[in-house]
Each structure stands twice: as C-alpha cells, then as structure tokens.
Image (cartoon, rainbow, N blue to C red):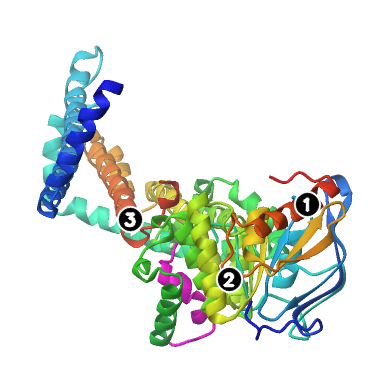
Amino acid sequence: MKEEATPSLSSRSDKQKELTSDLLTSIEERFRRDLLRSRRRRRIRRLLLNVAGVILFLIFWEIAPRVVPGVNLQMFPPPSGVVGTLWDLVASGELAGHAWSSLKRAIFGFVLGSIAGVLVGLLTGRLALLRDLSDPVLHSLRSIPSIAFVPLAIVWFGLGETPKVALITWGTFFPVWVNTFIGVRDVPSIYVRSAASLGASPTGIMLQVVLPAALPFIIAGLRQATAVAFVILVAAELVGASSGLGYLISFSHLVFRVDMMFVGLMALGALGFLADALFAAALDKIFPWYGAEAR
Amino acid sequence: MTPNRGLRPDDGVVEVESVSKLYPSTEGESTWALLDVSLSIRDGEFICAIGPSGCGKTTLLNLIAGFIEPTRGELRFDKAPITRPAPERGVVFQEYALFPWLTALRNVEFGLKMRGMAKVERSERAREALQLVGLEDAAGRYPFELSGGMRQRVAVARALVNHPRILLMDEPFAAVDALTRASLQTELLRIWEEIGITIFFITHNIEEAVYLGDRIVVMSPNPGQIQKIVNVEIARPRNRSDLEFGQLYATVNGIFHQQGGVVQ
C-alpha cells in the first residue's frame, strides 16, 4: 500500500492536467450515450421476452389438448382451431361491436361509481359524524357480492342498458369508497396543519391538500374497480343481453361453439390487460411524483 | 444585535400567559405537557426553546401556531387571542411537510393561491421567496428531487412568502447532516437580519441554540415547565470556538444537569 502511494499520487496529478473541459465533455457524452443504449437494450429485451412468453403459451395451448389423453378438440380447441373463428368475427365487425357495447357499459358504470366513491370517501374520511353514521350500513352492503344483485337489477330495470350500468356503478363504488376513505383518514396531519397555517380554508384544505394526498389510495381503488367492473359486466351480460362479450359467450354456449367462447374470453383478457396498462401509463404521465417518495 | 429591535419587556409580539395543557396518556391517565408557562416573545428577536423530549416545547409551538388550544391560560398574538392557525404565524416543521404533489414553486405559491392572489403576482412573489433562500433554480423540481437541506429551504420560503410576523420552527434542521445544518443556520440568521422577522426556534441541540438565539428558553419535563431563560449576549457573527461561546454552552449544559435530563 505504502509503496504504491507515491507513484499513484504523481500519476493522478498528471491525469488531472489532462482533464481539460473538452475531455470531460466527451467523457460525459460517451457516458450518457452508453446509458441510453443500455436502457434501450433492456427495454427491447423485456419486450422480446414478453412476446416469447406469449408464443410459449400459445405453443403449450396448441400441444396440450392433442397430447393429453381423452381431450376432445371440439371441447378444448387449440389456437389453430380458434384463429379462424377469431378472424371471421373480426372481419365481420361482430367482435368489435360486442366489445364496444361491453366497454361502453363498463366505462359508464365505472365513471359513475368512481365519482360517487370518491365523494363519499372524502366525506366519510373527513367528517367523523358521517363516518359513524354510515359505517355499519355501507360495510354491510359492501360485503354482499355485487353479482347477487343481478336478478334484482333485471326485475327493477329490465334487460336494457340500465341494469348493467347500475350494477357496475354499484360494484365499483365500494372499492373506490373504501380506498378513498382510508387515504383521506390517513392523510398526515402535518399536511393539514401546514395548509391551515398558510391560510387555507376548510374547503381549500379538502380539495387542494386532502384530495391530492389521498390520490395514491384513490388510484389503487380505481384500479381495483376496473377489475370489479369487468366481473359484474360479464355476469350481467351472461344473464340478459343482446350484445356484449358476455352475451357472445353465453350465445356460443347455446349453439355449442366452444371456439367462439374462446374468442370471447380472449377479448375479455385483452380488454382487461389494456385497461390496466393504460392506467399505469396515465399514472406516470399525470402524477410524476406518484410513488417517487419510495424511490 | 441591532439596536432598533425592541427590547422593552411589555411589547411582546406573542404573549403566553399562565398556559397549561393537559394531554391524555395511556389507559385514561393524563399528563401536564405544560404547566403554568408564561413567556413574552419580543418583536424581532430570535428565541430558542430547548429541552429534553417531553418538556412541552413542541406543545408550546403548536399552541402559538394555533393548532391546539390550551387547557388553561391565554395566548395572544399582537394583543389578540390566538384561536386558530394563520399566515401571520408561519410554521416550519421537522421534515416532510412540503406537499409532494407540487413543485417547489407551487409549494411556495400555495398560501398565496389559497388567499386568492392572481397567478402572475403570486408566481413572482414565490420566485422572490425562493431567491431569498437561494433556490431559484430549483423552482420546477418536486420535493422528492430535492435534498433534505433544500426541502427545508423551500419550507422556509413557503412560510416567508406570506410575510408572517413570526416564524415558528420545530427542530427544522434536526434531520440534515452537520455540514448542511451549519450552513442552514448561517443562512437563517442572514434572512432573519435581512427581513427583521421574529423567530421562535425549537431545538434539542445546545450548540444550535447558543449559535442562533438572542435568548434561550430552557425547559424541563414532568410537568413541562420553563426552567430558566438565558440571555445570549454574544455579538454576531458568533464563533463556535470562542471562549464566551464555550462558557455559555457550559452554562446551558449545567442547567440540564441540574434537572437530571439527558441531552445529547
């Protein structure tokens, strides 16, 4: 160690002389370029692996029904048996029509239920009186599985759009309410105190401090609600509808077309996946600080 | 000390008069966080409160800020009773009190916006406040992108932009490293002298109190009371290695040992 000290010291001072600003800039540029390249490489790698995973799954699905003894290919069609049906339904516009009417119901109900959930969550989270008043009722209603209301909704609202939207509104309300409530209840008091000492009114504190501070919870609730919306949507469409992906599946059942059922299921999977991906992307764009505290 | 800072005993900007605060503790018991505490904070002075945990120094700050109400006694600001928080009494907390969803500039603008100031004007004033704390370049950054020391500067700017008469600071530099703390202390003194504000500063660090304060309020726990008020008559800028600095440090330290409290 000691012997090395002298030469390394002198060589360092030599190098220091060479470190002109030009050299530094070029080192920085190279560093940045390498960083970007390695990030891009990692992104591409991830994408390739994602695609490979899907292909592997399809291969497994193609082979499994053929090698497992006793499987009827009519009952469990492999991808090759579904792709033709998929193409027919896509080309005729039938699939898009069903997907669109399902999506419309889901979005409508989701928006209504979420607005109600956030409002009630804000109020019950901030006002102890309302919280104590509503707690037993809301929690009892919440513990009834929303699907159990499907027959009632049909009796009340018939077979049109109303029962579906009403059911989804009902079902999405609860996760959004509970999460908003927790987020609002647990807003650090230091934020509220800061705002009060900066001159904010109670309404100002509610909208400008409590609401944004609870956003991570509210967003978690909204995300849960998208999943709930799909479950209820399909349940409602299975029972009584003349369009929608749930209807497509139940109709396929009547005409015994398992391949068509598979197309409906795949469409639901794709829609759910897209909804969640959109959610994540929007989150990053709209709230750059979200989750950053933990980083 | 500048001569124009009023030192007459009865023109306090904040008057704390025989204030007691009873807090519930575990299992239905209760403790006096403060018992019969009186204090007059003079206009323009830098006053430090120091004491072991449980001595009620934060309770005292919360009372002056208007976050809580006293069980007994009265608090007045500018001769009017303190009933709730107000921008004239700015508060800087220990840490993490900046709104994480707003940029530094928006954080500083917050109070002005809440009071309905027009956008252009408030942005201009917020920039001035950031400039005062030396952070005009960080205006667009979010709190998570700032170091602990920078966050506290923004917090100071956020309070100062409202032109408060008094700044209440609750161990604001406790969570930053020693070097950063020293420079924050120097800067706080510069700002204090520049704008002639009153500062009530809580710390658990004797050196910090001796370096900053015109007076040091030494408090003791169980029940929370003021044990002694020490005048610091050392000219600024103060030097931590001076003899009189060391002597005063020893004096304050001695008061602590009298009460048997353990202070770092």
Q: Amino acid at mark 2?
A: Ala
How far apart are the two marked residues, 2 and 3, measured between alpha carbons? 26 Å
Query: Image height check: is A232 above or below A62?
Result: below
Q: Residues within 10 Å of mark 1 (few under 14, many from 20)?
A: some
Report the residue at 75% width, 60% height from top.
B57
| Disc 3 chain ID | A
Per the image, the residue denoted by label 2 is: A195
Per the image, the residue denoted by label 3 is: A284
Q: Position of residue B36 (x, y in %)?
A: 89, 66
Residue B221 located left or right of residue A279? right
Query: Image height check: is A60 above or below B210?
Result: above
Residue A36 located left or right of residue B185? left
Can residue A113 be seen in the rendering of this structure? no
User: Is the Cβ of the residue at disc 1 closer than 8 Å to that at disc 3?
Assistant: no
Comparing marks 2 and 1, which lies closer to the viewer? Answer: 1
Q: Which residues are magenta?
A: B101-118
The secondary element bearing badge 1 is classed as loop
Per the image, the residue denoted by label 1 is: B54
State the residue lying farthest toward the top: A69
Comparing marks 1 and 3, which lies closer to the viewer? Answer: 1
User: Is the Cβ of the residue at disc 2 closer than 8 Å to that at disc 1?
Assistant: no
Whether labels 2 and 1 share one chain: no
